[in-house]
């Protein structure tokens, strides 16, 4: 069964909109774990508009499950992750001011850069994952750059799912097969939700982990966090 890592950026967005400490990011992360989440993901951005550096330092010793930090591998980001040492770092190519991650890496063009960053993470015993689209060439190049895993950027799947789910999943199944041939672990994320998650999990061979934030936190407004996490876990249960 693929593991569910809850992305708690939106909890920090809500907190920061008022100042103060409501909702409490750390407590929410601990509650996600208590309700069954198998990991916590954060994306500390340079402007700290949601997750702050201080959140990252607070979360690491408190979490009992897998801690995944995603972000663009700037010098500051690498310094942060090699100090905090999460279980996994997910490298995304987005600009600091991007609203959200909106594309995968060009692993061919950035081979040397990614290779250096991955070496640095591995020297600190941190598992690496590279955010990628479904192009097989990009996935093969991700493997050559030395990463442990890829995270498939699922926005195109989610966008097409309501019209034609078979067509939407096809490139992702092909990409997963290439990743497995390259001995890469497979994660996935972006715009996964209660409608499209089961079909994704049922069809992607070797899927290890999904990281889900926006839809899950929005669903929690209606169902509550405990029930919502249960519903997402149920989608991932074969
Ligand atoms: N994976 C990556 C690399 C992301 O940047 C994000 C959004 O922060 C997610 C997964 C989760 O996407 P969503 O919030 O749409 O579930």
Image: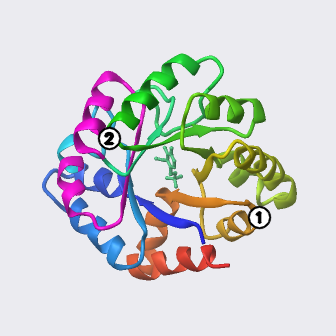
Q: Which mark is residue 44?
A: 2
Identified at 57% across, 28% down, the residue is 145
Identified at 58% across, 67% down, the residue is 2
* Element assignment for label 2: loop
Position of the C terminus, as image quadrant, is bottom right
Is residue 90 or residue 149 the one in the foreground? 149
Instruction: Identify the mark nearer the N-term, 2 or 1.
Output: 2
Identified at 54% across, 79% down, the residue is 231
Lateral position of residue 140 relative to residue 57, left or right:
right
Lateral position of residue 145 relative to residue 220, left or right:
right
Coordinates of residue 61 in the picture (x, y in percent): 19, 58
Q: Is residue 130 magenta?
A: no
Lateral position of residue 59 relative to residue 234, left or right:
left
* Element assignment for label 1: helix
Residue bounds of the magenta highlight: 56-85
Q: Quadrant of residue 28?
A: bottom left
Is residue 199 or residue 15 the one in the foreground? 199
Residue 52 in view: no
Q: Residues within 10 Å of mark 1 (few under 14, many from 20)?
A: some
Position of the N terminus, as image quadrant, is bottom right
Q: Which mark is residue 203?
A: 1
Is residue 27 or residue 14 the one in the foreground? 27
Q: Which mark is residue 149?
A: none
Coordinates of residue 139 in the picture (x, y in percent): 69, 36
CA–CA distance in space, label 2 to label 1: 31 Å
């Amino acid at each position: 069964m693929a593991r569910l890592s809850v992305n708690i950026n939106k909890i920090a967005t809500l907190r920061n909109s008022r100042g103060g400490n409501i909702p409490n990011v750390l407590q929410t992360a601990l509650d996600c774990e208590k309700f069954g989440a198998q990991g916590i993901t954060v994306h500390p951005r340079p402007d700290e508009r949601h997750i702050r550096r201080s959140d990252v330092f607070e979360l690491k010793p408190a979490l009992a499950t897998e801690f995944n930090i995603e972000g663009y591998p700037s010098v500051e980001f690498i310094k942060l992750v090699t100090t905090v040492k999460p279980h996994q770092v997910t490298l995304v190519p987005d600009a600091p001011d991007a609203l959200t991650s909106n594309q995968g890496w060009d692993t061919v063009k950035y081979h040397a850069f990614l290779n250096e960053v991955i070496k640095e993470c591995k020297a600190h015993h941190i598992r690496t994952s590279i955010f990628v689209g479904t192009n097989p060439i990009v996935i093969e190049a991700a493997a050559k750059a030395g990463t442990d895993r890829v995270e498939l950027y699922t926005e195109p799947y989610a966008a097409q799912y309501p019209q034609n789910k078979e067509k939407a999943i096809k490139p992702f199944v092909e990409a997963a097969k290439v990743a497995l041939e390259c001995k890469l672990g497979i994660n996935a994320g972006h715009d996964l939700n209660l409608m499209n998650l089961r079909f994704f999990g049922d069809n992607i061979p070797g899927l290890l982990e999904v990281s889900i934030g926006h839809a899950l936190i929005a669903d929690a407004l209606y169902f509550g966090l405990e029930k919502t996490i249960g519903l997402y876990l149920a989608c991932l249960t074969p």
